[in-house]
Every structure is written in C-alpha cells, then in structure tokens.
Amino acid sequence: MNDGSLNLDWMAWTWPTAVFFLTIFVILAIMTLWAALAPQPPRVGILRFATTPGDRLFVSLLGAAFICLAWLAAFGPPLWGGLAVSLVYAAAVFRWV
C-alpha cells in the first residue's frame, strides 16, 4: 500500500495504548525542557555512580516495565496495583539513586 496514507494496522491502537505512548512522549518532552532550562549536575546516590535526571527516568521506566510484567505474572490484569508500585519505585529512584 503506497498511496501516501499512514498504515497503522500493525498495532492495536486502543485508547489505553495511545494514552500510554502519549504519556511517555510528554514525560520525555518535559524532561528535555527541564534539562535545557535548568541543567542539573549529575549526583551520586546509593548506586555509587553519578546519574542525571534522564538516567533516573530511564531506570524508572525500565523498572516499571519489569514491575508491571511481574504483576501480570503474579496477579493478572488489571494493572492498577502494578502502576501504584511503579510510581512508588519511580519516586524512590528519583529520590535516592
């Protein structure tokens, strides 16, 4: 299909899927603006190596993915509990890592 139209049939675009990707995009945009307007020096946390806010965001998102997968394996859907645990994890990462 090369008529110039955008083919999105490869993925099941539901409202939750769209909100998820939009949320990730907005978080990345906010972090980019924050880094441009108020650069922060790397800081050393409990991991004993320097991390920037972008590093901590990456660790938070990666951890949230594993937390949600573990939640699905242990309890199944819905993921509200996994989301709550992920938010607490992200707050801890940004505070102490």
Image: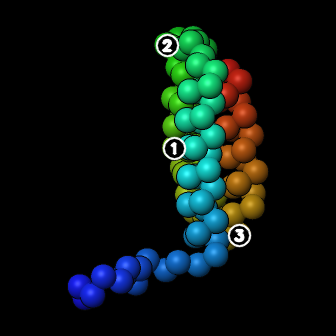
Label 1 with label 2: CB-CB less than 8 Å: no
Question: Local crowd at mark 1 within 10 Å, few (<14), some, or many (≥20)?
Answer: few
Looking at numbered disc 3 in the image, what kind of residue is underneath it? Pro
Q: Nearer the viewer, mark 3 or mark 2?
A: 2
Image coordinates of residue 73 in percent, x first then y, are 57, 62
Label 3 with label 2: CB-CB less than 8 Å: no
Mark 1 or mark 3: whose residue is earlier in sequence = 1
Tell me the element at label 1. Answer: helix
Tell me the element at label 3. Answer: loop
Q: Quadrant of the C terminus?
A: top right
What count of labels does the image hold?
3
Q: Nearer the viewer, mark 1 or mark 3?
A: 1
Up/down of 70 relative to 11, above or below = above
> Residue 62 shows which numbered tag?
1
Q: Residue at x 75, y 61 (%)?
A: 80
Image coordinates of residue 78 in percent, x first then y, are 71, 69
Q: Residue at x 63, y 30 (%)?
A: 34
Q: Residue at x 53, y 78 (%)?
A: 13
Image coordinates of residue 40 in percent, x first then y, are 60, 16
Tell me the element at label 2. Answer: loop
The image quarter in which residue 53 lies:
top right
Up/down of 66 relative to 5, above or below = above
- Mark 3 — residue? 78
- Mark 2 — residue? 49
Mark 3 or mark 2: whose residue is earlier in sequence = 2
Mark 1 or mark 2: whose residue is earlier in sequence = 2
